[in-house]
Each structure stands twice: as C-alpha cells, then as structure tokens.
Image (tube, rainbow, N blue to C red):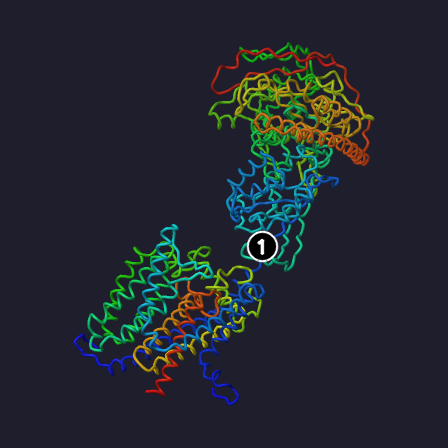
Amino acid sequence: MKLAHVPDPVARQPWGVIAPLLALVLLGTAVLHSAAGGSWQPYAASHLMRFAVFLAMALVIARIPQDFFVKMAYPAYAGVLVLLVLVEALGAIGGGSQRWLNLGFMTLQPSELMKPTIVLVLAAFYSNLPPGMTGSWRGLLPALILLGLPAVLVILQPDLGTALAICFGGVVVMFLAGLPLSWFLGAGAVAAVAAPLAFFTLLHDYQRNRVLVFLDPESDPLGTGYHITQSKIAIGSGGIFGKGFGNGSQSHLDYLPEAHTDFVFATMSEEWGMLGGFFVLLVYAQVLRWGLNVARQAPNRFSMLLAAGLTATVFFYAAINLLMVMGLAPVVGIPLPFVSHGGSSMMTVMICFGVIMAVQRWSRKGGTIT
Amino acid sequence: MLSGKRTFTSSMLHNSFDRRAAVFGALQGMVGVLLAGRLTWLAVAENEKYQLLAESNRVNLSLIPPRRGWILDRNGNPLASNKADFRVDLIPERIHDKRETIGHLRTLLGLDEVQVRELEDRLAKASGFAPVEVASGLDWDKFAAVSLRLPDLPGVVTQRGFSRDYPTGPSVGHLIGYVGAASREDWEAEDKSPLLITPGFKIGKDALEKTFDETLRGEPGARRVEVTSGGRIVRDLGTREDVSGKPLKLTINGPLQDYASRRIGLESAAVVVIDCNDGGILTLASMPSFDPNSFVDGIGRVEWKMLNDDDHIPLLNKAVRGLYPPGSTMKPMAALALQMQGVDPEERVSCPGGYRLGSRFFRCDAVHGSVDMRQAIEHSCNTYFWSMSHRVGYDAIAPVARLLGLGQEYDLPGTNQRYGTIPDAAWKKRKYGQEWSAADSLNASIGQGYVLASPLQLAVMTARIASGRNLQPSLLFDKVNPKAPLLPFSPQQLAVVHEGMFDVVNGSGTGGRSRIDINGVKMAGKTGTAQVQTMISRGTGGAWKSRDHALFVCYAPADKPRYAMAVVVEHGTFGARAAAPIAKDVLTFLFDPPTALETLHALEKQWGGTPKQRLDRKYAAYSAQAGLGLTPAEALAAEEAKAKEEAEKKAEDEKKAAEAKQALDASPTPGPSPSPKASPSRSTAPSPVPTAAASGPAPQAVTPAPIGSPAP
C-alpha cells in the first residue's frame, strides 16, 4: 500500500476494505441506473452521494479512541432503547405499527441503530466481566436481558428480520466471548422445540405465510410466492454473462418486485449474469475476511469482540438477503448493503465498518505503544 | 468447556476466541460456497428454463381473431358478411376497480342506463378470463378517446377488428343462426384454446353458423408485444396476419329469402321454396324471427325477454321444427297412392256432403256431387278420399307419403329438423298399444288425426310430385344433385295429380283467388286448412290460438315445374285466404320482381315497416314498458335513422329485383299451360275431423265445418 508518491494520510486509510466497497458501490450504482430505466434519477445519483457521506462518516468514526467507545457503550444502548420504546409508543398513538422516527431532516430507524449498538454493549459487558464468571449465570443473564429487551421491542413493531439480525449479532458476541458450548447446544435444542410452537402462535399471518410459501413457492405463484419466483427467473435467465447492461426485462417490465431495494441482486444478476453475482460474493468475502482478521489482531478483549460482532452483523445482512433472492430463505425485508437503494442499511453497515476500522487503528497504535 | 465448574482464565478465553472465530469464519465461508453453488445452479443448469419463463413474462402473444368466412347465396350475394368494427372489451380479472372503470367507460362512450345495466349483467356472469364486450361498432372518436386513456383503465381492451353482419337481419335469422362469444363450455370443449377467449372472437351459436363453424372460422393472426407486468404494451415485436375463413355457398336465393320473410308480414308462418331441378332449397323462411345482428354483441336481457314472451315464438324455426297437421295438402299425395293401388282416376264417387262409416257420418265441406280424382283434388272433396282410402286402407297410403318425404329427416346439416308423423297400424300399436281403426284411415287420408309434417317436408313432397323425381333437399350449393332418380309413378299417374292441382288454382278450385299468369307462367297448388287439435306446449285460449292453420303447397310453372313451395300460416284460418296469397306473391317475385315488390311495399306500409323496423319499434315499446325508455333526443335520433334506413331499403330492393330478374332470364321460359277445367265451385275449406285419440270420446259427432268464403 505504501507508495512513495501517495501522501501518508491517504495511504494510511484501510484500503483493504474501502477499495472493494467502492467497487461494489459502483456496480450498485450501475444497477440502479439501469433499474431507473437508464437514468441517474432517482436512485443512482443519491446512492453514490450517500456512499460518499457515509464513507466520510466511517472515516471519522475510525478516528475515535477506544476509551470513548467503552464509556459510551451503555449510554448509547440506553439511548437507542429509549428510541425504540418511543417508536412503539408513537405507533400505538398513531394507530398501527411504525418503525421509524421522523426527525424532520431525515427518518431514523432506531432498530437499525440497535444492530451495531447491541454488539457494542455486549462487547463492553464481556470485556468487563471477570474471566472466572464466564461460565456462571452472571455471565449469561445480564447479556440475555441486554439482548432480549431490544429484540422484543423490534418484534413488536413487527420486524422479524431486524430482530433476527440483532439477535444474531448478540449471540455471535456471546459465542465468541467463550460462554460454555453446552449452553448454545442446549439453547439450540430448546429452539428446535420452541420454533414450531412460535411459528403457530407468535408469528403474524403474513409472516407465517411467507415461511409456508418459501417452502413451496409454486403454491402461490401470483401472491407471496411471486417475489421468489420472479427473482429466480431474473437470476436464472441472466445466465453466465447476463443480458447486458440495461437489458433486464424482468426488472424493466416490472415483473420483479422491489427491483431496486430488496431484490436488487436479482436485477443485477439478470443484467450482469453469474459473473456479476460472483463479483458481489467475492467483495463480501473479502470485506468479511478483513473484518475477522481485524478482530483476530485486535489489541484487547473489548475490541476483538466488537470487531467480530460487527462483522457478523454485516455478514447477516448480506447472507440473508442473498439466500432470500435465490430462494433459499423466506422473504424477509432485508436489503443488500451497498447495492440496494436505501439509506438506513448503508448507514448501519458503514457504522459497522467505521468501528472495525477504528479497531484496526487501535491495534496499530497498540503495536506501537504497548 | 463441558461443565460450568470449569474455571476460566483470560488466556483460555483468548484461545477460545481464536478457535471460535475460526469456526465462525468457516461458517461464513460455507454460506458463501452455498450461495455460489446456488447461483451457478440457477444461472447455468436452470438457465434455459428461466430464460423461457422470462420470455413468457416479457412477450405477450395476442391473437387476432380471424375474419369469418362469408355465407353466400346461390348468386354470390352475402347473407352473412363482416364489417369493420371498432370495439371495446373488458377482461374482468384485470379490472382493479369495477365501478370506477364502468364509470369512466360510461362517460367516454356515452353509454345509457340500459347499456350500463346490461354491461353489469354480463360482467356479473363473466368468468374472469373471458372478455366481456362493452361496445362495438364505435365511431373513431369514441374509440380513440378510450384508446388514449387505456393506461388508466386496467382491464379495458380496445380493438379494431371485424364483426359479423347479416345484411337482411331477421330474414335469415333462423336459417343462418348467429354468432356470439364462446361460453365456458365452448372454451373447455376446445381444450381451453386461447383463441376462444380472445376479445372480439365469435363462434357460431346456432344453425349454419354453428354447424359449419370449422369451415367459416379461419386461422387467427397473432401480434407479439412486449408488455409490463401491469399489461401495458411497451412495443410491437411482430404481427402475423390472420387467414380468413372459407366462404359457405348456399342454394338459397337471397333476395327471395328476404322477400318471402318480409311477405309473411305479421303472421306466424313458414315459407319453403325448393328448386324442382336439383332439390336446392331456395328459401327457408320462418317468421317472426329475431335479428341475428343483435345476438352478435350478446343479446340484451330486455330483448331476450321480449323474444321469449312473444306467443308467435320468434325463436323457433318453424320451417324445420314446426309440425302441423297438413290437412288437405295431403290429397295430391293420396291421389298418387290410390293410383298405385289400382284406383282408376276416372272412377267417380258421389259426394252427398259426407261419408258414412258404420254408424258415424263424416261430413264433407259441401255437397260436391259426383267427382273423379281430378275434381276431388280441385274441390278438395273429403268424401272421395274417405271412400277411396277406406277401400285401400291407410297402410297402403303411408309408404307413398314416406316415399314423397313425409315423416323423413333429410341430410341437411345446420338444420335441427323434427320429422313429424306418418302413422300406420304398426306405429299406432307401438305408440298407443291400440289397433288401427277405419276412422284413423279416414282422418289420416285428409292429413288430420295423427299426421304431422313440417313445412320443409311439405315443400319436398310438392317438389317430388311436381318433378316425379326423388329430389333430395340441399342447402349447400355444391351438394345439389340435378340427376335425382325417377319415382315409381307413371307419367299418367302424375299427370292426373298435376291436372288436379292445376285446377285448384286455375279452375274453379279452392285456390282460385291466388291465380297468377306472368307471361304464361301459371301455378298449380293445393290448399289446406288444418284443425288445431293438439297444440301442445302452448297456452290454450285466446282467439288467435284456436284458429285453424292455413296451408298451401304449389309449384310453377305448372307445365314445366321449376319451383315448388310450401306455405304454412299458423292459425291463419283458411289455406286459400292466408297461405295461398303469400305463395302467389313469392312466386310472382321469382318471375316478375317489380310487381311483387310493389305489392310488398303497399303491405308493409299497412304493417308498419320491414320486419327489422317493426322489431326495433317493438323493442323500444317493450323496453319503455320495462321502465328503460329512451330519452326524447334518442327517440328522435332513432326516428331519423329509421327514415334513412327506409330509403336505403328501397334502393336495395330495387337492386335485388334487378338481380332476381337477371337470374330469372337465365331460366327456361315457361310453355303453354294446360287448359283449365271448368267445374262448379262450391266450397273451399276441408272439414275439420274429430280426433281418434286413444282416450276421449269416440269420434262420433262431426263438428260442423266452418264455411269458407267461396272462391271467385
């Protein structure tokens, strides 16, 4: 990375993650340009602009010292939790579910903020926990409460996908924190029993329907199964090399629903083919590998858990979205970061990357100072 | 790691983190491999399948309904043709908001309340996939107005196509049938062919249109377009032209068919004209009728109700499905049968005004005195035929009746014939389990009792008597057989009957008032007045329904038969009064069209216009009664349209007359006719004869015959 003619502040940036993301965002911009019928408006231009803004934000986050994160972990968690309650309350007053707060200049989705926050607070919790207590109830119960509160609030919204994302991030931190493996196996066994029960009692009709249709999309080709079927048609008909830029009939003729948001991968695959799909997979593989490497080389327990947990959050985003559009998971409203049009997800993921970059900085400093 | 008792240290946790992070990394890698595998599977292995699906999404193949083959008369004039048509349809399953869509269409097309209600009716009955017609025959402005707004009107389809047109409307309704949109049953019967649910596509629903649907249909064209999921057309990808259906040429003489239908006027009647050379059916008219043009777009419920409520049964083709006791029109046939049994035509029978059979007395219409066979036909003397058929028995007459086509079903695709009854001893035994009685023979011999025949059969009988050949009736122009074999009657035997029939009209017989003489062309005929005995499936009571049926069979020219005809007027009273004049005018039209049209125009003035005009007026009155009246402005417009139509009709008639004249010029000129035989004229109408029904009073008493007006 260190080239003589590149100024040091530029060369110091974590190009191992910025470069692939930039490439992915450029591909996303092209896809959105095509999805808008060959126009920069309304998706492509704002997509690029947002990335610029959020990248700047991430680079700023990357300069924040570790102490500040540790200090702010619980207050930040409490703040986001209050916002979640507020959303719930406003929804109840307004009559109907609500997921966001209108701040006037932008709409804020607190559940999105909770994804990195839960990782932050659990990393803080476990780094403060005396190692000896890791195997006792004091290593588990507080963590479960910290995780359970936001999960329940988000499920009530109801937003199953985001709740699962929060739980996934939290559970990965707990797993990496070294809690006894038997607990996870036990919880898995309980979940295996409880899941069918929850399926028939807790889920909303439309959620249950999505799961059923996922198992058999052809049972409802014009209803819920339509999304999955059309998505597979788009991906499958693209073939190896795709139909070419701007030639995707599935997206351009409106057969593909949510062509610029949740199902943007299908839009992309139709025009760029399997090769485009591999490119997206490789970018994610690269940045996730980078994230995990940062975690491994992180200077202390807090930063290790933080970086690994945030990597897991990003992984969950991409994996669920890709599994969904390829018909391997039920339809849940999760966008594909850096390709889908939409600010919330990009913001969340860029916060994650910003913090991981910060961890990378700490480890460099740690290498020099300690 | 296996138990909670285990103590944890910082370095252990660090090791555990490294291990578990590796596991987590491996898990991510596995998901990545899974995704890559799935992507490859979809894009490579299933590429072909999904490409096909994407294409079938993208490309919409819309069929272009083929132009239906024309139905032509013998001279190539269209009886059914196609006219260019701008139309608007609705595809029910694509409609988002039914009320809003109908509201828009109402404004754009200027639909009135009745039309809107009927549209709603059709929509309610529609089954989603099949198009429902909103309007057809639109002018360009309205068509364009709807076409422009199509993006805001999901489910609405506009089309420039062709629709079926029957220039002579009600005159050919029964003969040709009509077309209509395919029903669910039709669609399923054809393996759910997409053509059948294409907007604007019609299939034959009745009579010839139905039977020859395959011939007439043609091959649909196709238009490939790229469409969005919402059905909006993005661009045209290509068009294949349709292949028009094959024409169907009939033996029908179009102008004659129209003339006969219109000449029937206000009566409920059927007229059948057959070519004596080849059996070709020139006219198969049944009136009143319906206008097949109003069925093309799906008939409205008011109109349907009007047709159904009519006691003249406009929906029944009386020419082939109406069965009537043929009355005295059977006498020429009976005369042939008697000769076959060795009865000498010169043998005389004395008619004292009736015939005694055992203790019963069958009353004749008049005291005819001494008559031979010719005179018995001329004066329609029942006594002669009673006494003779008592001698030979009806079982000897029935085979001749069948030989002449009575009680038979003919090979006429597209007609749904009823074949009536020619009774004999075996038939009665089978049907009623009773022995044939002498009284049955007497009744049957004068075409009463069990005997039933359709107008078509009477025309065939007349044609066979006139030609002496076993003519087979035909409707298809290329199926006629001009070389029909001779019937087993000697020329002498036939001559007796021909002379008798000639005298009916030209002598002092019952049909004298309907005599014609057009450049030497004369007609021979036989009247019939049949008692209404068993009018089943009709309400009883009412003066009209209890009147006798009037019948007349005839052929012309008398000396060289070319045309044979049967006219049956339901409840027309006397054959000579109601049926023979119609026959006379129809024959006149064949030989002297201008004179015949003059007669018709004078009559139609009395009746209140052509059948089409009367039907329209009746509809207006009927719908007004049903509370669906036209606004004054619409009524005015209708009046104007009617006046215009009248003028056009007149011009058309003149053209037709010229055509008919031309056709006539090609036919051989008639020779001199045999001299009429003078005979005293006494009475016209044959007597009603009591039924010999199984249960019921024995036919003892004889009702006094209604006295007909004497022939001039």
Subunit bearing disc 1: B
Residue occupied by mark 1? B232
Left or right of B524 on screen, residue A163: left
Q: Where's residue A147, x and y in %?
A: 29, 66
Q: Indicate the quadrant containing the C terminus of chain B: top left, top right, bottom left or bottom right.
A: top right
Examine the rendering and report whether any part of residue B196 can be seen.
Answer: no
Q: Indicate the quadrant containing the N terminus of chain B: top left, top right, bottom left or bottom right.
A: bottom left
Is B561 located above or below residue A92 in the figure?
above
Left or right of B566 on screen, residue A367: left
Give amino acid for label 1: Arg
Q: Name the secondary structure under disc 1.
A: loop
Location of residue B395 by image quarter: top right
Is B581 located above or below residue B194 in the figure?
above
What count of labels does the image hold? 1
Observer-nearest of B564 and B171:
B171
Observer-nearest of B228 and A157:
A157
Is B542 located above or below residue B289 in the figure?
above
Observer-nearest of A150 and B59:
A150
- Residue at 41%, 74% (x, y): give it: A61
